[in-house]
């Protein structure tokens, strides 16, 4: 027999409990108080509330888990139990080991909210809800529901399933049982008196108001997760916006483009702060906390802005009403993408005969990935066709949207091969021109007076770098972009030597020429990183995305400074090139380790296994809360394709659309 029953028995002996009725009130997400229990519905007596508080303090001391319990009449803003509970948890800053049971006593709904990256799994939370909490609530046993939830979490934390009975020890009534009851009652009386005295003195400080601030580690985890979710939301929204512009024109999409621009500006600022946190300069704990909090605020604002426009965007496209027409359009696009895939595959084979594997690393598996996207698109188009035949426009729209994104991504993967081929060819041309210039510089420098031997040293070093670059530009394993970096370093070295004998006009012309070459190289690197990450964003985390965002910002600054300040433009272009290279490496590491040991997609993948679903998850076309970069988020997956909206966050598998991370899959909870 548990402590709460003993406390209730003692209380019943000395207190007459009466129920006070009142009109049901709809309640928006609440602010938690100083204790673990918030009874806005008035269903607990003062002694029951004290008993519940004591039980939840016991849970904390035994397991390290926090559980808050909220009773209201009805849920509103939002009215869905899962959304209401998750919103309350997030508004109050609950962490990964902190849970919230929300109960609408008049609305007869409930939900146990927990972070998906916490120690108790979604399956365990489901079991706790269905086998422990719901039976108590169905009997209006409000205090029993608290104990049931606490017992379930204790069992789950100890390795059990969380279900009722998994922690049972069996046995019937006996004299020992009654002896234990007497002992427990005595202990309960003492504990209750001590607790009430502490409460009167204001000593109870459990809960958000009395708890220490969220740890820096938790802020960092949440900031990284939100960066990934928000970046995904913007990338998906951009793709959807492109489809809409092609269909309806620029004028019809102005408000959505403006919303995206504002959201992107906020995300860019957030990525800039993440880069400051990641760089080699040490940050104070105060700055670390403040910058992570700012990242969280910026990402939440960006998502909210996109969410505000989602309904209007869906109304513009009207995929449900226009499903047959949309299906035909996507089928035509799929046919074109399939035809282009053969050409892209042939082009890649040709490149592999001329360039080193590392020069082609960002597109090496693009044909296989594109085939996976097309296989997934075929499956979704077939499902959409069947849904149209059954008169289910909503289900058809889900398949059409998923297929549309898959075909668009297949096209991106194919085009990336051609773009890289063009960049490599341009790199070869620029490298050849720079070789000619360096040869002339070496000849001119060799004729200079050299009293201290410095000229000879620079000339020798430049010749060595020149030979290294030449070797990278010949044969069947060329590395033109690497050769350019080698030649640029040699050029900087000999330019410093020749600066004194060149007139200002020649120096300015050389500076502009070199800036143009470096910017071309940086643009190629940024473009390759962007295509690689976009097509594999389901696996790519915050670090790679941060480097890419900063590379793009540096490239934009270089372009703005190219005419007015070539030297600063050169530095910004070089920084962009370096950051983009880091982004590619980090993203490749993420993809290589995605899905567990050896990487689910690390080997490049085959064609159409799993109906292309793995490729769709990797590409971020299908959103899976268990695999999304950064992890985290409250609410658990309900599984299956579904949901029309939400580019980031949430749970379950569904195709993304225009919007932010405001939607969550419905998991668990229910009525009682």
Image (cartoon, grey):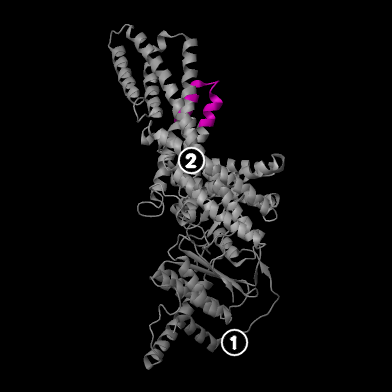
Residue at the spot x=46%, y=43% of the render? 367
The answer to which of marks 1 and 2 sits earlier in the sequence is: 1
Mark 1 packing: few (<14 Cα in 10 Å), some, or many (20+)?
few
Q: Which mark is residue 271?
A: none
* Camera-side residue of 464 and 360: 360
* Camera-side residue of 31 and 531: 531
Q: Where, quadrant-wise, is the N terminus in this rendering?
A: bottom left
**Where 460 sits versus 615, above or below?**
above
Q: Where, quadrant-wise, is the C terminus in this rendering?
A: bottom right
Residue 95, given in percent of the width and then of the height, sits at 48, 60
Q: Is residue 94 visible?
A: yes
Residue 112, given in percent of the width and then of the height, sits at 53, 68
* Camera-side residue of 565 and 162: 162
Q: Which mark is residue 16?
A: 1
Mark 2 packing: few (<14 Cα in 10 Å), some, or many (20+)?
few
User: Which label sits in the foreground, 1 or 2?
Assistant: 2
Q: Are marks 1 and 2 in contact (CB under 8 Å)?
A: no
- Give the quadrant of residue 161: bottom left
Check if residue 571 falls in the magenta segment: yes
- Residue 19 left/right relative to 215: right
Residue 119, given in percent of the width and then of the height, sits at 42, 64
Secondary structure, magenta segment, majority class: helix
Q: Which residue is mark 2?
A: 342
């Amino acid at each position: 027999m548990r402590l709460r029953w003993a406390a209730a028995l003692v209380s019943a002996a000395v207190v007459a409990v009466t129920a006070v009725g009142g009109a049901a009130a709809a309640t928006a997400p609440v602010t938690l108080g100083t204790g673990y229990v918030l009874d806005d519905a008035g269903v607990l007596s003062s002694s029951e509330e004290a008993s519940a508080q004591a039980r939840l303090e016991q849970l904390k001391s035994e397991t390290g888990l926090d559980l808050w319990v909220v009773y209201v009449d009805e849920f509103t803003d939002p009215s869905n139990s899962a959304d209401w509970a998750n919103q309350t948890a997030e508004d109050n800053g609950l962490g990964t080991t902190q849970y919230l049971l929300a109960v609408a006593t008049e609305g007869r709904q409930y939900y146990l909210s927990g972070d998906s990256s916490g120690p108790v799994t979604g399956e365990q939370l489901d079991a706790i809800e269905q086998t422990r909490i719901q039976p108590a609530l169905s009997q209006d046993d409000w205090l029993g529901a608290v104990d049931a939830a606490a017992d379930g979490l204790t069992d789950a934390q100890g390795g059990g399933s969380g279900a009722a009975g998994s922690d049972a020890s069996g046995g019937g009534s006996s004299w020992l049982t009654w002896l234990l009851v007497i002992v427990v009652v005595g202990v309960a009386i003492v504990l209750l008196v001590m607790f009430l005295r502490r409460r009167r003195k204001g000593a109870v400080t459990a809960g958000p108001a009395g708890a220490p601030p969220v740890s820096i580690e938790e802020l960092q985890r949440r900031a990284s997760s939100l960066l990934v979710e928000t970046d995904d939301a913007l990338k998906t929204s951009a793709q959807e916006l492109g489809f809409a512009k092609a269909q309806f024109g620029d004028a019809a999409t102005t408000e959505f483009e403006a919303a995206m621009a504002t959201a992107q500006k906020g995300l860019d600022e957030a990525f800039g702060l993440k880069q400051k946190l990641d760089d080699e300069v040490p940050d104070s704990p105060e700055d670390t906390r403040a910058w992570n909090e700012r990242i969280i605020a910026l990402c939440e604002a960006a998502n909210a802005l996109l969410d505000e426009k989602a309904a209007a965007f869906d109304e513009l496209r009207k995929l449900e009403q226009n499903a047959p027409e949309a299906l035909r359009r996507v089928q035509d696009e799929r046919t074109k993408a399939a035809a282009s895939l053969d050409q892209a595959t042939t082009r890649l084979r040709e490149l592999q005969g001329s360039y080193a594997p590392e020069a082609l690393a960002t597109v090496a598996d693009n044909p296989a990935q594109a085939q996976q996207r097309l296989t997934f698109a075929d499956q979704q188009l077939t499902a959409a066709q069947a849904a149209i035949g059954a008169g289910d426009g909503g289900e058809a729209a889900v398949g059409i949207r998923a297929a549309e994104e898959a075909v668009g991504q297949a096209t991106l993967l194919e085009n990336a091969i051609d773009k890289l081929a063009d960049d490599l060819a341009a790199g070869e041309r620029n490298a050849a021109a720079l070789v000619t210039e360096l040869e002339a510089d070496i000849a001119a420098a060799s004729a200079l007076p050299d009293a201290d031997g410095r000229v000879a040293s620079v000339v020798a070093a430049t010749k060595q770098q020149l030979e290294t670059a030449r070797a990278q530009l010949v044969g069947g394993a060329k590395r033109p972009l690497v050769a350019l970096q080698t030649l640029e370093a040699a050029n900087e070295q000999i330019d410093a030597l020749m600066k004194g004998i060149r007139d200002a006009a020649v120096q300015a012309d050389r500076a502009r020429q070199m800036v143009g070459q470096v910017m071309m190289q940086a643009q190629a690197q940024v473009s390759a990183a962007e295509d690689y990450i976009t097509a594999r964003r389901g696996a790519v985390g915050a670090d790679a995305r941060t480097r890419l965002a900063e590379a793009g910002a540096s490239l934009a600054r270089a372009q703005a400074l190219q005419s007015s300040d070539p030297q600063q433009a050169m530095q910004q272009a070089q920084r962009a090139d370096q950051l983009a290279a880091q982004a590619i490496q980090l993203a490749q590491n993420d993809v290589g380790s995605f899905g567990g040991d050896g990487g689910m997609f690390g080997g490049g993948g085959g064609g159409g296994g799993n109906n292309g679903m793995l490729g769709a998850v990797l590409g971020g076309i299908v959103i899976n809360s268990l695999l999304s970069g950064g992890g985290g988020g409250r609410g658990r997956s309900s599984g299956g394709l579904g949901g029309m909206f939400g580019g980031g966050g949430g749970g379950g598998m569904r195709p993304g659309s225009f919007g932010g991370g405001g939607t969550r899959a419905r998991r668990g909870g229910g009525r009682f």
